[in-house]
Amino acid sequence: MLNGARALEAEPPLARRTLGASVHGRLAELLIAGRLAPGERLSLRDTAAALGVSVMPVREAVARLVADGALEVAPNRAVRVPLMPRGRFLALAETRIAVEGLAAARAATARSAAELAAIRRAEAAFRAMAGQARPDLQRAVALNRDVHFRIYEACGLAPLRDIIAGLWLKVGPVLNLDLRSDPARLRQGSALRCHAAALAAIEAGDAAAARAAIVADIEEAAAYIVARGGLAAEDAAPG
């Protein structure tokens, strides 16, 4: 008969496993919220010190994010946010249009009163930031994320939300190239208009209009980022 205690000896301690998951969640949040920019490097030791943990859970979390394509290891072993080639960015945008459009459409008919209230608060917070004379552009990127994810959380499909979170792990840093580029872009770009249209459609239960608003937001932001020329060459390699 197998010895259960012996089998458990091979398992990592629960505290360490939980800590590694927590570090992964924090780093993923930074990526999704656009707090890290393409090409930005991460020091394992500095990250561990900032989070108040040892290097080991940071190394484990970074390994998971590298496997997901959200981070990369350069030939000199430095860890960084990948640069985004134009073709890959456009492929991600097309995929986002399909899945995020679906989530918005479902949110229009599936959302609860509490979820609608959360969408309203997120849209109002983003609009308030955009209206400031000197907006915090980094905060604006995170607030933009909040609007989108409050909508997607109301779609009623957990697997769809997981897919979207995986896409934003990769595209979140690139959104720095849009909303953080210029306060005028924040005030006059598509995000304010599209967020308001999405909210109105979800309030009205109009699935087609909700999908159209999110699709327009993704398309217009993608076109701006491409036109701005901040993406990497197609053959860019880690370095």
Image (spheres, rainbow, N blue to C red):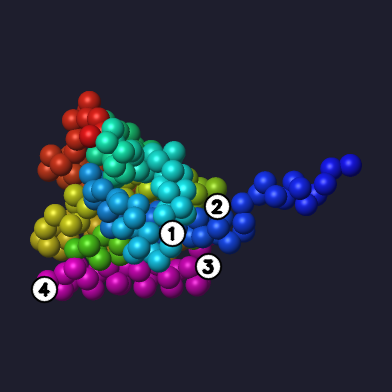
Of mark 1 and mark 4, the one earlier in the sequence is 1
Q: Which residue is mark 2?
A: 157
Q: SS at mark 2?
A: loop
Q: In the rendered image, which quarter contains the C terminus? A: top left
Q: How many marks?
A: 4
- 12 and 196: which one is in front? 12
Q: Are marks 2 and 3 in contact (CB under 8 Å)?
A: no
Q: Which residue is mark 1?
A: 54
Distance between the Cα atoms at labels 1 and 2? 36 Å
The answer to if 64 sits in the magenta stretch is no
Q: Are marks 2 and 4 in contact (CB under 8 Å)?
A: no
Residue at x 43% of width, y 59% of height: 54
Residue at x 34% of width, y 64% of height: 50
Distance between the Cα atoms at labels 2 and 3? 13 Å
| Nearest to viewer (mark 1 / mark 4) | 1
Q: SS at mark 1?
A: loop
- 79 and 156: which one is in front? 79
Please rate how many residues cluster around mark 2, counting C-alpha atoms within 10 Å: few if below 14, some from 14 to 19, many from 20: some
The answer to if 135 sits in the magenta stretch is yes
Rendering coords of residue 181 (x, y %): 14, 54
Q: Which residue is mark 3?
A: 112
Amino acid type shown at disc 1 = Ser
